[in-house]
Image: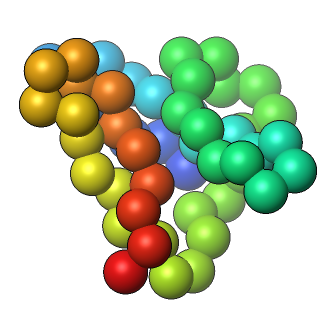
Amino acid sequence: MGYEHENSRGQKYFLHQRGKLFFFSKKSEDGIEFPEGFIVVENQRTGLPMLKRK
């Protein structure tokens, strides 16, 4: 099981990767560990977490 993030609304998201693209999904299967050099930010309007370089 990979990295799990709970947003401010209490929803759980799991980190995935496809090529160079990192994204969060509610599906836990095929999750990856948190990569170095990134931080998690949250879209204030939708609550969706995103990765951002430090």
Percent position of residue 39, x then y = 37, 67
* Quadrant position of the C terminus in the picture: bottom left
Question: Is residue 32 left or right of 48 when viewed as pictured?
Answer: right
Whether residue 52 appears in this view of the structure is: yes
Judge left or right: residue 16 versus residue 38: right
In this rendering, would 34 be left or right of 43? Answer: right
Residue at image location 55% in from the left, 50% down from the top? 3
Q: Position of residue 31 (x, y in %)?
A: 72, 40
27 and 1: which is toward the camera: 27
Please provide percent x and percent y for residue 42: 24, 41
Q: Position of residue 23 (x, y in %)?
A: 60, 38
Q: Residue at x 72, y 48 (%)?
A: 21
* Quarter of the figure that contains the N terminus: top right
Compared to residue 1, the image places residue 36 above or below, namely below
Q: Can residue 1 be seen here? A: no
Query: Residue at image x 77%, y 25%?
Result: 29
User: Looking at the image, is 52 positioned above or below residue 54?
Assistant: above
Instruction: Give the image quarter of residue 11.
Output: top left
Furthest toward the right, the residue is: 19
